[in-house]
Amino acid sequence: MIILAATPIGNLGDASRRLIETLERAEVIAAEDTRTAAHLLRALAVENRPKLLALHEHNESERAAEIVQLARETDVVVLTDAGMPAISDPGYPLVAEAARAGVTVTAIPGPSAVLTALAVSGLPTDRFTFEGFIPRKGRARWFAALATEQRTMVFFESPHRVGESLRDLSTAFGAERRVAVCRELTKLHEEVVRGTAEEVAQRFAEGARGEFCIVVEGAAETAADADAALEQVLELVASGIRLKEAAAEVAAATGLSRRDLYEAALARRSR
């Protein structure tokens, strides 16, 4: 079995009892950085010294089959440097290979920088998208493609590029778009700076130290969006789908109100 184990993103006190117990009896750990994994074992006072295998972005595709085969014989605990494996960290190719091979994959839930940043951001949490690390090149075009996204967006960024990225974000999304910049979450110098895109871009123009999560408000719904969604509902109804089901389907895809779409479609049909 493969066990994806979430580790603290900063504060060691966030390590769960289940994580510690699993590490105490682990025979094999596949780690993003074996040195970091060894340090974690010491920091958590885990006396067990399991076999450590390196599993990182440069070798995970090649090692996935090997580790999956090993997981047929013994449990393999997968650790990344912080947070949940496979979430913008090594793990996905391994899980995909295990699924193909019929090997069980389970997880020890725990700290997540994405969810922590979202929760403290003060921005809508009902629908969101995680976009991973902001690219080093082509940021302006990349942001422009996300400018109409209506869900709250969460990004990772390095301290060295955060100033430039926030500047490009402000240009693409508009100076008044609400943003929360979360720095050093769960650590001693944790900081959450909320404001408009322009304000936070100015605040971090010179960069800053630490790990960064950036949470951005989704784009506002426009009349054109609502009109397009209504047309989708009417097309589905014309194809034979019940109005209630059509409204629910389009609402789920667009984030618009199912009731509003249903009533708008009824009004259109009664003309």
Image (tube, rainbow, N blue to C red):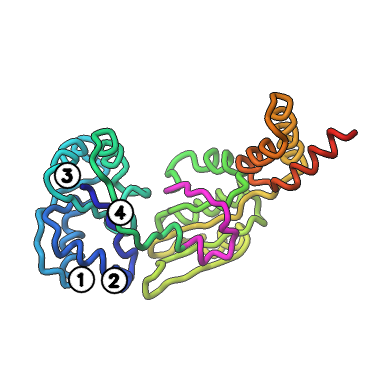
- Magenta stretch in the rendered image: 117-132
Label 1 vs label 4: CA separation? 19 Å
Task: Tell me the kind of residue under disc 1.
Answer: Leu
Residue tagged 3? 71
The x, y position of residue 61, in whole percent, is 24, 36
Give the camera-side residue of 202 and 9: 9
Lower position in the chain sequence, tag 1 or tag 3? 1
Say which mark, if any, is on residue 44: 1
Q: Residue at x 37, y 49 (%)?
A: 87
Lower position in the chain sequence, tag 2 or tag 3? 2
Q: Nearer the viewer, mark 1 or mark 3?
A: 3
Task: Tell me the kind of residue under disc 4.
Answer: Ala
Residue tagged 4? 107
Lower position in the chain sequence, tag 2 or tag 1? 2
Query: Is there a contact, CB below 8 Å, between mark 2 and mark 1?
Result: yes
Label 4 vs label 3: CA separation? 14 Å
Query: Is there a contact, CB below 8 Å, between mark 2 and mark 4?
Result: no
- At mark 2, the secondary structure is helix
> Which corner quadrant of the image does residue 113 belong to?
bottom left
